[in-house]
Protein backbone atom coordinates (compact mmCIF):
# COMPACT_ATOMS: atom_id res chain seq x y z
CA UNK A 1 0.00 0.00 0.00
CA UNK A 2 2.85 2.38 0.73
CA UNK A 3 4.35 1.80 -2.71
CA UNK A 4 1.08 2.47 -4.51
CA UNK A 5 0.45 5.58 -2.42
CA UNK A 6 3.92 6.78 -3.37
CA UNK A 7 3.18 6.21 -7.05
CA UNK A 8 0.05 8.30 -6.72
CA UNK A 9 1.49 11.10 -4.62
CA UNK A 10 5.10 11.24 -5.82
CA UNK A 11 5.40 9.68 -9.26
CA UNK A 12 9.00 10.86 -9.50
CA UNK A 13 9.86 8.57 -6.56
CA UNK A 14 8.05 5.51 -7.90
CA UNK A 15 11.07 3.93 -9.57
CA UNK A 16 13.20 4.34 -6.46
CA UNK A 17 10.50 2.79 -4.29
CA UNK A 18 10.03 -0.09 -6.74
CA UNK A 19 13.77 -0.78 -6.76
CA UNK A 20 13.90 -0.79 -2.96
CA UNK A 21 11.01 -3.23 -2.82
CA UNK A 22 12.63 -5.47 -5.42
CA UNK A 23 15.78 -5.67 -3.33
CA UNK A 24 14.02 -6.14 0.01
CA UNK A 25 11.15 -8.39 -1.05
CA UNK A 26 11.71 -9.77 -4.55
CA UNK A 27 8.66 -12.01 -4.32
CA UNK A 28 6.42 -8.94 -3.97
CA UNK A 29 8.19 -6.67 -6.44
CA UNK A 30 6.29 -7.55 -9.61
CA UNK A 31 2.93 -7.28 -7.85
CA UNK A 32 3.84 -3.91 -6.40
CA UNK A 33 5.11 -2.64 -9.76
CA UNK A 34 1.81 -3.71 -11.33
CA UNK A 35 -0.18 -1.97 -8.60
CA UNK A 36 1.91 1.16 -9.05
CA UNK A 37 1.21 1.08 -12.78
CA UNK A 38 -2.52 0.79 -12.17
CA UNK A 39 -2.44 3.63 -9.66
CA UNK A 40 -0.43 5.91 -11.93
CA UNK A 41 0.20 4.62 -15.46
CA UNK A 42 2.90 7.26 -15.96
CA UNK A 43 5.05 5.36 -13.46
CA UNK A 44 4.69 1.96 -15.13
CA UNK A 45 7.81 1.97 -17.27
CA UNK A 46 10.07 3.46 -14.61
CA UNK A 47 8.79 1.10 -11.93
CA UNK A 48 9.15 -1.96 -14.15
CA UNK A 49 12.66 -0.95 -15.20
CA UNK A 50 13.70 -0.41 -11.60
CA UNK A 51 12.37 -3.82 -10.58
CA UNK A 52 14.20 -5.53 -13.45
CA UNK A 53 17.46 -3.75 -12.62
CA UNK A 54 17.19 -4.62 -8.93
CA UNK A 55 15.99 -8.17 -9.52
CA UNK A 56 16.72 -9.48 -13.04
CA UNK A 57 14.81 -12.69 -12.32
CA UNK A 58 11.64 -10.58 -12.17
CA UNK A 59 12.01 -9.62 -15.83
CA UNK A 60 10.10 -12.68 -16.98
CA UNK A 61 7.13 -11.86 -14.76
CA UNK A 62 7.04 -8.20 -15.76
Image (spheres, grey):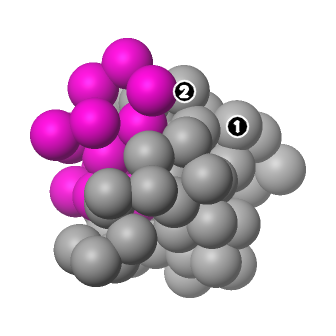
Please name the residue that numbered disc 1 is placed on: 16
Q: Which residue is mark 2?
A: 20
59 lies above or below 8? below
Report crowding for label 2: few under 14, some 14 to 19, many 20 or more residues within 10 A (C-alpha).
Answer: some
Q: Going by the image, does 33 lie left or right of 48?
A: left
Q: Residues within 10 Å of mark 1 (few under 14, many from 20)?
A: some
Q: Is residue 14 in the magenta section?
A: no
**Chief SS of the magenta region:** helix
Q: Does residue 42 appear left or right of residue 27 in this picture?
A: right
x, y (%) of residue 24?
Answer: 37, 18
The quadrant of the rendering that contains the C terminus is bottom left
Taking the spot 32% from the left edge, 60% from the top edge, the residue there is 58
Whole-percent x, y for residue 54 in the image: 55, 42
Callout 1: SS:
helix
Residue 40 or residue 29, whichever sits in front: 29
Which residue is found at the position 63% from the left and 66% from the top?
Answer: 49
Image spot of residue 38 (x, y percent): 38, 75
Q: Is 8 rendered above or below residue 39?
A: above
> Over which residues does the magenta segment extend?
22-33
Q: Outermost residue toward the right?
A: 12
- In the picture, the disc for residue 31 is none
Pointer 1 with pointer 2, Cβ within 8 A: yes
Residue at point 83%, 50% (across, down): 12
Residue 11 image position (x, y, % from top left)? 73, 54
Which of 62/42 is in front? Answer: 62
State the SS at label 2.
helix
> Would residue 4 be visible to someone looking at this image?
no
Residue at screen point 23% across, 74% down:
61
**Quadrant location of the N terminus in the rendered image:** top left
Q: CA distance from mark 1 to mark 2?
A: 6 Å
Considering depth in this image, is 23 or 37 the residue closer to the camera? 23
Q: Is residue 23 visible?
A: yes
Amino acid sequence: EIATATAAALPEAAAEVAAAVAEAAPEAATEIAAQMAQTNPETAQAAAQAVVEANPEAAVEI
